[in-house]
Image: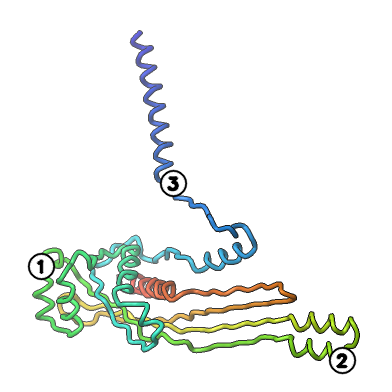
C-alpha cells in the first residue's frame, strides 16, 4: 500500500513540475502583439513595415561584454549644433538616457542619474569646469566612492548636407498630343500622358557625436572619440490616370542618436576596458 501511495505521489509531483514548467514558459515567452490596422496584410502595409523593421532597435554585440568595465556615471553633454529641427527635439538628458542603456548592455556598472538626485548638478559642474577639488569632495559621498569614470556625449554636428529632387509632369506632353495627335486617338493619348505625375525627393543629413571619458578623481580626460553617421530621408510618388503609388520614410533623429551612442559605446568597450 505504501509503495502504491509513494508511486502516486511521484506521479503527482512530476505532473505538477511539468505544468509548472509549461506555466513558466507562458510567463517568460516574448509577447506577441496583433496589428489592428485596417490595411494590415496589404502591399502598402508590407512595404511600410519592411521600412520600419530596418529602422527598429537592434542590440549590439559588444566585443568585451563578458568583461566587467569600470564603474561610471554619465553626465548630460552638450548639443552644439544650431539646427533648429534637432535642438527642438533633443535635450542632453535624452542622449544620456540612451548612453546609460547601452553602457549597461556592454557590462559597465552605471550609477544612473536618477539615483544621484540633486548631486548631478554639482558633479556636472565640477567635471565641465575641470575642478578636481570639487570633484573629490563630491565623489566621497555614499555610492559615488566606487566611481572610476565620468562620461559625457556631445552632439557636435547635425545638418542636412545634400538634397536631390527629380520628377515628371505629363501635362505639357498631354496638351501637345491632344493638339497635334488629331481625332479621338490623339485626345485619348493626351489624356493618358497628361495624367502622369512622378516625383522623387531625397535628403541626407550628417550627425556627429563625441564622447569624453574623464577620471572621476582628477577630472582629467582619459580618452575621447568621435563618429558621424548619415541619415537619409526620402519620398517617392507616381500617379497615372488617377491611380497613385507613393512612399516616404527613413531613419529618424531618435534612431540616429541611438545608433551613434551604440557606435561610440562599442568603441569605448573595445578600446578602454
Mark 3 neighbour density, 10 Å: few (under 14) some (14–19) many (20 or more) = few
Is 163 left or right of 118, judged from the image as shown?
Answer: right
Which element carries disc 2, helix, strand or loop?
helix
The quarter of the image holding the N terminus is top left
Please rate how many residues cluster around mark 1, counting C-alpha atoms within 10 Å: few if below 14, some from 14 to 19, many from 20: few
Looking at marks 1 and 3 on the same chain, the residue that comes earlier in the sequence is marked by 3
The residue that appears at 81% across and 91% down in the rendered structure is 176
Q: Mark 2 or mark 3, which has the lower sequence index? A: 3
With respect to residue 24, does 66 lie above or below?
A: below
Dot placed on the residue nearer the N-terminal end, 2 or 1: 1
Contact? badges 2 and 1 (CB < 8 Å): no
State the image coordinates of residue 55 (x, y, percent, origin top left): 50, 69
Q: Residue at x 62, y 82 (%)?
A: 200
In the image: residue 16, left or right of residue 48 = left
Which image quadrant is residue 165 in? bottom right
Residue identified by numbered label 2: 180
Identify the residue shown where x is 73% and y is 76%.
240
Q: Of 110 and 205, which appears nearest the observer?
A: 205
Instruction: Report the residue that reaches farthest toward the top.
Output: 1
Label ID, residue 141: 1
**Residue closest to the eye, 114 or 221:** 114
Q: Quadrant of the C terminus?
A: bottom left
Which disc is residue 29 wearing? 3
Q: Position of residue 153 (x, y in %)?
A: 31, 78
Q: Is residue 39 above or below residue 27?
A: below
Dot 3 falls on a residue whose secondary structure is: loop
Amino acid at each position: 500500500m505504501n509503495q502504491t501511495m509513494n508511486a502516486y505521489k511521484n506521479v503527482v509531483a512530476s505532473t505538477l513540475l511539468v505544468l509548472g514548467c509549461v506555466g513558466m514558459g507562458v510567463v517568460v515567452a516574448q509577447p506577441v502583439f496583433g496589428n489592428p490596422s485596417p490595411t494590415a496584410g496589404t502591399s502598402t502595409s508590407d512595404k511600410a513595415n519592411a521600412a520600419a523593421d530596418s529602422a527598429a532597435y537592434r542590440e549590439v554585440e559588444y566585443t568585451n561584454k563578458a568583461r566587467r568595465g569600470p564603474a561610471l556615471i554619465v553626465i548630460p553633454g552638450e548639443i552644439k549644433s544650431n539646427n533648429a529641427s534637432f535642438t527642438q527635439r533633443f535635450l542632453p538628458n535624452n542622449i544620456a538616457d540612451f548612453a546609460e542603456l547601452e553602457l549597461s548592455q556592454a557590462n559597465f556598472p552605471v550609477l544612473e542619474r536618477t539615483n544621484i538626485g540633486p548631486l548631478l548638478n554639482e558633479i556636472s559642474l565640477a567635471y565641465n569646469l575641470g575642478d578636481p577639488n570639487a570633484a573629490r569632495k563630491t565623489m566621497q559621498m555614499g555610492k559615488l566612492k566606487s566611481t572610476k569614470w565620468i562620461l559625457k556625449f556631445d552632439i557636435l554636428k547635425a545638418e542636412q548636407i545634400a538634397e536631390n529632387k527629380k520628377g515628371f509632369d505629363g501635362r505639357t506632353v498631354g496638351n501637345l498630343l491632344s493638339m497635334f495627335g488629331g481625332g479621338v486617338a490623339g485626345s485619348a493619348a493626351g489624356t493618358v500622358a497628361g495624367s502622369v505625375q512622378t516625383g522623387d525627393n531625397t535628403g541626407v543629413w550628417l550627425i556627429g557625436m563625441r564622447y569624453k571619458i574623464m577620471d572621476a578623481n582628477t577630472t582629467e580626460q582619459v580618452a575621447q572619440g568621435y563618429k558621424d553617421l548619415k541619415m537619409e530621408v526620402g519620398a517617392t510618388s507616381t500617379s497615372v490616370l488617377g491611380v497613385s503609388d507613393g512612399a516616404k520614410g527613413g531613419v529618424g533623429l531618435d534612431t540616429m542618436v541611438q545608433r551613434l551612442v551604440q557606435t561610440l559605446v562599442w568603441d569605448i568597450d573595445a578600446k578602454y576596458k
